[in-house]
Image (cartoon, helix red, strand yellow):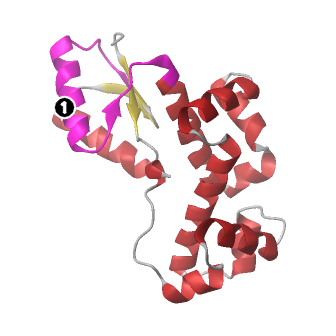
Amino acid sequence: MPGNVIHIKNMVCNRCKMVVEQLFERLNLPTRSIELGEVVFAHDLTPDQTAQIEQELSVLGFELISDRRARTIDQISTAVIAYVSDPHLMGKQNLSDFLSDRLHTNYATLSTLFSTDRGITIERYCILQKIERVKELLIYDELTISEIAYRLHYSSAAHLSAQFKSVTGMSPRDFRNVRPSHRISLDEV
């Protein structure tokens, strides 16, 4: 594990960052920065500290990533989740440009790597993430289906409904009425 930087799998939201930050405070390991999927420490880690971090992260549902390929795939997943979570970002830039800019890599390279590892395209993964976001907004029951479609940059409520039904097997309206108690965790999509 190189020096003072570690990469963490399944660290996909701000709550994850908070949990990881609390862990390192508890372990008395000062950090310079904590971003989704990456932590930079103030000092180089010893092998014992790295082993302890790996064990503690595992208990919390995270894992260390040492392989560059796995790290890139995790960065793609994290970036897609960030993209779907930010309606303003979706409105400013298309997904392929966003990923290329964020990861400083040609999109075709990212797409091939992701598809080979995950067995689905980045676009399909983005659709699945958007559907999970739609489910969340439907459960909150604060927005109409048209408002959700607008927020998530669907061309229309009909387009959202068709995509939702294709993925879940039910319409957004039926989903809202049934209010299923379980959603898929974003890192499991």
Q: Horizontal and vertical percent for residue 88?
A: 72, 54
Q: Which residues are magenta?
A: 40-69
Residue 54 forms part of the magenta stretch = yes
Q: Quadrant of residue 96?
A: top right
The relative height of residue 179 versus residue 64 in the rendered view (above or below) is: below
| Amino acid type, residue under disc 1 in the picture | Gln
Q: Quadrant of residue 122?
A: top right
The relative height of residue 160 versus residue 39 in the rendered view (above or below) is: below
Q: Callout 1: helix, strand or loop? A: helix
Q: Residue at x 67, y 41 (%)?
A: 121
The relative height of residue 108 versus residue 179 in the rendered view (above or below) is: above
Mark 1 lies on residue: 55
Determine the residue located farthest toward the right in the rendered image: 155
Q: Horizontal and vertical percent for residue 54?
A: 24, 28
The relative height of residue 83 versus residue 109 in the rendered view (above or below) is: below
Front-most of 45 and 76?
76
Q: Residue at x 67, y 49 (%)?
A: 124
Q: Looking at the figure, which quarter contains the N terminus? A: top left
